Structure formats: C-alpha cells, structure tokens
Amino acid sequence: MAAPVISVESLTGARFSDQLLVSAKSGGCASSSCGSSTRPDDVDPAIWDKIKDHPCFSEEAHHYFARMHVAVAAACNVQCNYCNRKYDCANESRPGVVSEKLTPDQAVRKVIAVANEVPQLSVLGIAGPGDACYDWEKTKATFERVVREIPDVKLCVSTNGLALPDHVNELVDMNVDHVTITINMVDPEVGAKIYPWIFYDHRRYVGIQAARILHERQMLGLEMLSARGILTKINSVMIPGVNDQHLIEVNKWVKQRGAFLHNVMPLISDPAHGTHYGLTGQRGPNAMEMKALQDRLEGGAKLMRHCRQCRADAVGLLGEDRGQEFTLDQIPGELTYDAGKREAYRELVADERRDRLAARSEAIGMVKTTSSGKSLLVAVATKGGGRVNEHFGHAKEFQVYEASPIGINFIGHRKVEQYCLGGWGENATLDGVIAALEGIDVVLCVKIGNCPKDQLADAGIRAIDAYGHDYIETAIAAIYAAESGVPALAAIA
C-alpha cells in the first residue's frame, strides 16, 4: 500500500513545527551525510554525496530541496539574442530577470534570512543577472562571506564560460562543487546567429570570430572543471531553425569533455521582453518538439529534464519562487543564522526519501513486467515531495512522466495558467491548459471538477483523481497496469 503521507508542504507547515523544534533541540541531523542511505543503486557514492541535496543536479532531490540565487553579478561580457537583462521586474519568470541587485553584504543578509525561514534551502547560486565569472570580485566576495555564516550550504555558479578558465582554481579553493555553463553551439557559424558580440581581453569581437573565441573558452573551461572533479551542467537553449539540430553535436562534444548533465531548454521568445529574438519573431519550440529532441539525445550526455529556467533572484523549490518574500525592505538589518530548522528538515525528509525510493523501485519493477508494449504520457499536478498532491484547478505546472516497458521516467514539465480563478475567465484558461497538455494521455491530480474533466476527455485526455497523495510512480504504475489488464490493487500492494 502507499506510504503514509508526509509531503514537503506538511514538513514545513504548522502541524510539523513542533516536530521540527524537537528535532532541532535534539541536535537534528548529525552530519551533512543525512539521507545518504537513499542513494539509488546506479549512482556512485561520491557523486551521490555531491548531488543528493542539489535540486538542479538531481531530479530526485528537486522534490525536496530548494535553491537560492543572489543577484550580485550584474556585468556581462556576452550579448545573446535571447537575453535582455532586466532589473526591477517582479512579474517575469526567466533567466536574467531580477527585482533588485545586491551588494555582497546585502546578499549575505538575504541568504541568512532565507536559510532561517526556508528549511529546504540547500544551494546558493550566482546566476547573474550578468555573468558570475566576469563580475568575479562580487561573486567571490559573496561566497566567502556566506560560507563563514552557513558553512554547509552548497555553492553553485552559472556562467557563459568566456571568463571561466581564469577562475577555475579559485572555484576549487572555495569548494564550489557545481558549475553550469551555457553552451548553445560548437560551430562558430551557428554561434554567429546567436551571439552579436563578446567582450574579451579588453576588446569587443563580433560575428564568427566572436563565436570562435567563445567556443574555445567554453571547451577549455569545461575540460578544466572536469579535470578538477567539479560537476558541470551544460545549459543549451533550443532555438528552432538556428541550433535545434545542432544540439545533437553539442551533446556529443560536452559528453566527451566530462559534462555531468546536459539541460536543453526551450527558447523564451516574447516581443514584450525586448530581446532580439522576441522582436524579430523567432519562435520557441513547443513541448512535443522539445521531447522529440531530448529523445534523440538519449544515450549521449545525461539529460536534465526538470529545469524551470529560474530568475537570477529565485528562492524556493524548483517551480516556485518566493523571492518577493525576501526583498531587502523586509529583511532586518541584523540577523543571526539558526541552523535548527534546516537540520531538522533534512532528518525528517531522509525517512520520506527512503520510503519513496522503495515505492518507486517497486512501481518501476511492476511496469517493466507488464505485458503492455505501449508508452503512456502522464501529467501530474504536484506541490512537491514526489506525490500527487495538487488540485487540477490550482496547478501552475504539470510534471510529465513517461511509463513504458523500460520503466517510469520524468521527462519534463508543462507550465500552465492557473485554471481555477474564482469564476473569472476560466473557460478561456482551460482552453490554454488543454493546449499545453498536447500529447498527454492521463492527468493525475488530487481533485478535479466534472466540467474540466469532461473537456479534457473531449480532447482525448483522461483525468484521474483516485490516487491523491500517493507517490507519483505508484499511481502511474497502477494506471499502466490497468492498461495492460493487471488488477490495479496488484500494482500498489
């Protein structure tokens, strides 16, 4: 049967506050290895120790742990046709956007405030709004001051790679275990269509020459990081008609040079954003085009499919952003870090992760042994914790899984506009949700009304709310088994 319900929401909500307090007073999790017994069998122990609490480098961890970006690095040395860095923009959720820029001292205050209130926090990243390696002095100063206050937080850097080789040794000295490099091409002719100019060695370069320099520096930085044991994630923006087919070659290059993950992201292109691509009508890929490319990349560098293309000041679990709760005007001038909540949270979540790992293994085993040869795409309404725990009408995104004879795999997410709006504009919103669910066979949620359920059915999508609060894989296995004629109870026993 399904394991007892302990969602991320309940772990941080009022009904668990007493447990957190008791655990904190008793010493909480004794070491940073808490949760290590949840390691999947196919993951090297040394790698697992680095990724087990990192929501970007581990799909499993992103159900439980949060990241925080501090916007201290405003200067950039590369212009991208998909980027228009904005400051003081609270309503857009995309890279390069922030509500307020920070000094290193302000960043430290903000990190302490978040760590005291968001027990899921495990990673501090600097992802702009410019480039963390180009605006290096601010990046370095921020990390040095934060680790003095919160020594167990993981440090993470995102960069375009142009200035990266100059700072690899310092990254090693600061114990930075994770670096993300945005690499959109390995052919300078393709790169010239993406990058109007770069600024390198006190000069501005344009065209193919600029793209060639950027490419060479990115490859050098990646090789240096791999040689020093730093895990590297490669971000690539999929731009239809520009680099969509070329990303197959990018995947081969980065795998050969030791990249740990390859994250292919859709181009965000809207005229309102003021980017070159937005203003010239360059479209982004649709969900099925993204899936088709990711499927072609299977067997190459390991793919990351759970990215949410975060703002440069994002706070919280992937898929949520609590940054507006922690603007500078809401943070006291003097703060003292209290590790109790974070330590207690890790201890409570370790048990939940062990239960989910066992349930997931059982569910995947059942799917592999069924007689069905078909694949099933399932969109799940979830708040986190690896469970079906969101009302259809409240969902702002759906996590998408594929069940097939090879198992159950997370393949991405579909962002949607919240359907349930208190009676205003819901019909039009539902049409948008259905469009976003193109290709989906089944929707799983805690609850759904008859009207949206019927309209989904008319679009060929079944909505099922019989598995509320079950683990996602357990619910999917039960549905897949039923498709194959296996009794549902046998799937979840």
Image: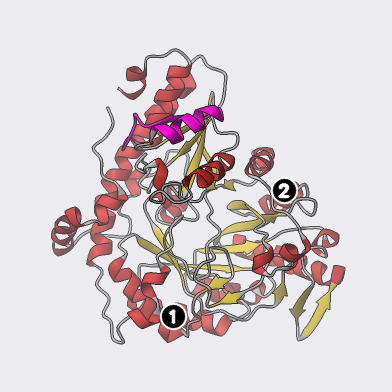
The Cα atoms of the two marked residues, 1 and 2, are separated by 35 Å
Of 52 and 266, the residue lying toward us = 266
Q: From this viewpoint, is residue 366 visible? A: yes
Q: Quadrant of the C terminus?
A: top left
Q: Secondary structure at mark 2?
A: helix
Three-letter amino acid code at disc 1? Glu
Residue 387, horizontal then vertical, whole percent: 36, 40
The image quadrant of residue 474 is top left
Q: Which residue is mark 2?
A: 252
Of 128 and 160, the residue lying toward us = 128
Residue 272, horizontal then vertical, whole percent: 65, 66
Residue 362, horizontal then vertical, whole percent: 37, 28
Pointer 2 local density, CA inside 10 Å: few below 14, some 14–19, many at least 20: some
Of 339 and 415, the residue lying toward us = 415
Three-letter amino acid code at disc 2? Lys
Q: Is residue 172 left or right of residue 297?
A: left
First-in-chain label (1 vs 2): 1
In reply to whether residue 464 is colored magenta, the answer given is yes
> Which residue lies at the image location 68% right of the left edge and 54% below the top edge?
254
Q: Is residue 324 left or right of residue 428?
A: left
Q: Is residue 363 left or right of residue 267?
A: left
* Above or below, comparing residue 265 to residue 207 in the picture: above
Give the magenta part as a residue range. 450-470
Q: From this viewpoint, is residue 29 visible? A: no
Q: Which residue is mark 1?
A: 144
Would you say the residues marked 1 and 2 are in contact, meaning their CB atoms lie under 8 Å apart?
no
Q: Secondary structure at mark 1?
A: helix
> Which residue lies at the image location 28% right of the left edge and 60% below the top edge?
31
Residue 323, horizontal then vertical, whole percent: 42, 69
